[in-house]
């Protein structure tokens, strides 16, 4: 495989108007990624799949990462695709797409029309992160039930406070159970007093 | 009801057995427990091992795993019960004919286990259905499951047919357990309050008091 800078140049020339950026991962996993804008992500994916130099015929992994707002910088959800070529035995190319964290605006184009294997994984990202994949053939929850309204893998998710009875609370559970008025053993109360004093 | 022990023994030598009907009934029931064939997670592997040749659950008459709740009288909840799966588990239990029993196998089935803090895991199946025997362990060894079945057999052996202490002989008792609904954030309700009672004030109980009692 060519270095990522070369790949970026090739794509910029092939896909008109595509805004690409190279994202270095921290800590360096030696796998820098290509960040595509939402409007051209599908075209970039299609190019990687069909171009004879890449022939990325296999999408091995789709996931999402939640970035909370940091200072003035707004937060965003980053969808990550790992692409491999089985026919050329090369890869991965990591393709990233970013969308705002607000659920109504959190839309990215679906790459399921290109790689059928992405279907369930995009549904999982939709289920747990609340990313809407435009163009997905069957976008509904896959792990949680249909009536569920939260997105549990988001960093600001609050799990339901069912701490009615906590025989062995510790750390976060101890704090949350105390807030929810859960029933705890006497030792847990002492532990809680200690942490409060600190 | 009471038969002289000496007479009993004498009759036995002649091939005549005198015993209360209840004892015979319970003996029949406890000696052929048919578990429901279903597993939820890794504990099911241990359950399968218990039924297979090495541990041989057949020695205790509980080897006939039935693939339908209509023919089963023991539910072994083997593994993590996710909130998505819990309504189905309760529904299966409702579909079993009475008398029926339940063994909660492993840390997850009794309390949620290592996944207790997860948003998607039920903190013990005893929140929705009555559990006769709890087995701790992650996963429990086949010996532990066999011990649980023997414990259940001892429990069955002491049950009375006439006194209305069992819910299947109680005309007023409900035999259907409400199936929780999928809510927007959690199962609704989060527990069957008629069935599941967390200790009312755990904070007031000290070790000295337990020792005194």
Image (cartoon, coloured by chain):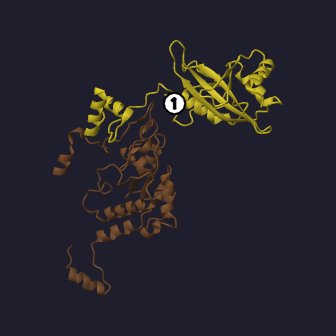
Chain colours: A yellow, B brown
Residue B125 horizontal/vertical position (percent): 40, 46
- Which quarter of the picture shows residue A39? top right
Locate the N terminus of chain B and report the quarter of the image it occupies: bottom left
- Which quarter of the picture shows residue A165? top left
> Is A124 above or below relative to B56?
above
**Residues packed near mark 1 inside 10 Å, few (<14), some (14 to 19) or many (20 plus):** some
> Is A127 above or below relative to B89?
above
> Is B74 above or below relative to B110?
below
Q: Nearer the viewer, residue B113 or B88?
A: B113
- Which quarter of the picture shows residue A178? top left
Residue placed under numbered mark 1 in the picture:
A153
Residue A44 horizontal/vertical position (percent): 74, 23
Q: Nearer the viewer, residue B174 or A71?
A: A71
Q: Nearer the viewer, residue B123 or A22?
A: A22
Residue B32 horizontal/vertical position (percent): 42, 67
> Is B78 above or below relative to A125?
below
Question: Could you tell me which residue is drawn at 20 percent across and 39 percent down?
Answer: B204
Q: On the picture, is B117 further left or further right than A142?
A: left
| Extreme residue in the right direction | A52
Q: On the picture, is A130 further left or further right than A194?
A: right
| Extreme residue in the bottom direction | B14
């Amino acid at each position: 495989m060519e270095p990522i800078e070369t790949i970026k140049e090739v794509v910029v020339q092939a896909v008109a108007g595509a805004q690409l950026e190279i994202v270095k991962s921290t800590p360096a996993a030696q796998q820098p990624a290509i960040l595509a804008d939402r409007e051209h992500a599908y075209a970039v994916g299609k190019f990687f799949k069909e171009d004879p130099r890449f022939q990325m015929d296999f999408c091995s992994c789709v996931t999402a990462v939640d970035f909370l707002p940091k200072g003035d910088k707004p937060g965003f959800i980053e969808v990550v695709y790992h692409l491999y070529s089985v026919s050329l035995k090369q890869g991965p190319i990591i393709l990233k797409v970013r969308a705002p964290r607000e659920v109504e605006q959190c839309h990215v184009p679906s790459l399921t029309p290109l790689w059928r294997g992405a279907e369930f994984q995009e549904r999982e990202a939709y289920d747990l992160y609340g990313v809407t994949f435009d163009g997905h053939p069957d976008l509904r929850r896959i792990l949680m039930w249909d009536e569920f309204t939260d997105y549990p893998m988001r960093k600001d998710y609050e799990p339901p406070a069912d701490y009615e009875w906590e025989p062995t609370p510790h750390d976060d559970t101890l704090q949350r159970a105390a807030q929810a008025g859960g029933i705890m053993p006497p030792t847990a109360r002492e532990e809680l007093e200690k942490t409060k004093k600190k | 009801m009471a038969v002289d022990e000496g007479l009993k023994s004498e009759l036995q030598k002649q091939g005549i057995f005198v015993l209360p009907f209840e004892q015979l009934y319970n003996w029949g029931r406890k000696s052929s427990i048919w578990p429901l064939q279903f597993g939820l997670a890794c504990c099911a592997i241990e359950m399968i091992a218990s039924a297979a040749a090495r541990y041989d659950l057949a020695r205790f008459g509980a080897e006939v795993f039935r693939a339908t709740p209509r023919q089963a009288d023991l539910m072994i909840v083997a593994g993590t019960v996710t909130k998505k799966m819990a309504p189905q588990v309760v529904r299966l239990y409702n579909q079993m004919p009475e008398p029926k029993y339940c063994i909660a196998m492993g840390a997850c089935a009794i309390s949620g286990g290592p996944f207790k803090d997860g948003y998607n895991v039920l903190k013990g199946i005893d929140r929705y259905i009555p559990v006769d025997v709890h087995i701790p362990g992650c996963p429990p060894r086949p010996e532990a499951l066999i011990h649980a079945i023997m414990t259940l057999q001892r429990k069955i052996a002491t049950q009375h047919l006439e006194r209305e202490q069992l819910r299947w002989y109680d005309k007023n008792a409900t035999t259907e357990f409400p199936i929780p609904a999928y809510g927007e954030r959690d199962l609704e309700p989060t527990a069957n309050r008629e069935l599941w009672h967390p200790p009312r004030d755990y904070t007031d109980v000290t070790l000295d008091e337990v020792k005194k009692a």
